[in-house]
Amino acid sequence: MPDEVLIVGGGLIGSSIAWRLARKGAQVTIADAGNLGGEASPAGAGMLSPRAEFDKPSVWLDLGIESMRLYPSFVEELRTETGIDTDFRMFAPEEGIVDPAALLRALRCACESRMVRIVREHVTTVHPRKYGAVVIAAGAWSDKIRVTGHVLPAVIPIKGHLIGFQLEPGALGPVRRRGDTYVLQRSNGFLVAGSNEQDIGFDRTVDAAICEDIHRRAAQLFPPLKHATPVKRWIGFRPRSATGEPHIGRVAGTNVWLAYGHYRNGILLTPVTAKRIAAEIL
Ligand code: GLY
């Protein structure tokens, strides 16, 4: 068991690693610049579809399928510990949805009850020798953190827009998807439609024309949206690594672990990332 574990970034990835470690008795601190997972985590739609995202064999597909298999027990353990329902539903063995905001709330609650120390701090520099282990899980901001003795692999923000509608619960049924367009609905009726991609840095503007385009595309998939009015429009930054593959694992010969670069799949890959990183550290 290492001494204190510092996790930089308290989104779904960082919080789930913290929870997994704390359950085994590790002493864990999460440092997060904002409101613990205020960035990519709640910005996602929560679509869990490895076979729709990846049509060819790849590391992504393998991770996605493994993570999908872990999802039912992951959310059930969280619900047992916290009482929070994450609105996880599976329409097929490898096809489901989850509410990312509820998942984040549950993880935060689980971390707090497991005595994870949570500090609101914009970490710019980390000295790994001060800790038993350090995990970098700061999404699209990860490579901005200076870790003495290391150069972290580059990551860039890929901006995406989503729009939300309030509809009758159950109006949609399973997720619908064609190309870059998808629609899914939470149990409370809130329907999310996405998305697009822009490589334009950390620009937080919500672009009305892009939202209208998503609305038009979503209405082709689900015609009742044609005359519906969005009640919410928002953006998020997917963290895409320079290699195009996620960084999940130890920096060789060090006590530094990387858990970022999940690009379009952070929510899907949360359980498998937490399992792998926590197991290696422990
Ligand atoms: N995973 C879907 C998206 O990033 O838009």
Image (cartoon, rainbow, N blue to C red):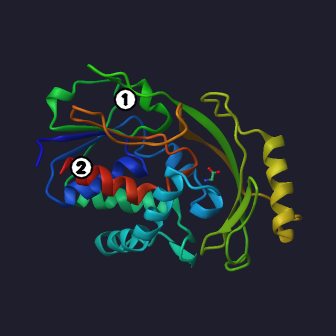
User: What amino acid is at disc 2?
Assistant: Glu
Give the residue type that dot 1 points to: His
Query: Are the residues at dot 1 and dot 2 in contact (C-beta closer than 8 Å)?
Result: no
- Measured as percent of width and height from the top left, residue 1 is found at 10, 49
Quick check: 212 left or right of 93? right
When asked about the image quadrant of residue 67, the answer is bottom left
Q: Secondary structure at mark 1?
A: loop
Which mark, by number, is residue 279? none
Q: Position of residue 239 (x, y in %)?
A: 53, 39
Q: Can residue 243 be seen here? A: yes
Q: Which residue is mark 1?
A: 122
- Location of residue 221 in the rendering, given as x and y in whole percent from the top left corner: 82, 66
Pick whichever, 94 or 218, lies toward us: 94
| Sooner in the amino-acid sequence: mark 1 or mark 2 | 1
Q: Nearer the viewer, mark 1 or mark 2?
A: 2
**Quadrant of res 206:** top right
- Residue at image x 35%, y 51%? 15
Taking the image as shown, residue 225 lies to the left or right of residue 148, namely: right
Q: Which mark is residue 280?
A: 2
Q: Position of residue 195 (x, y in %)?
A: 71, 50
Residue 268 visible within the image: no
Separation of marks 1 and 2 at Cα, in angstroms:
26 Å
Mark 2 Cα within 10 Å, few/some/many (few <14, many 20+)? Answer: few
Element carrying mark 2: helix
Seen at 44% across and 46% down, the residue is 37
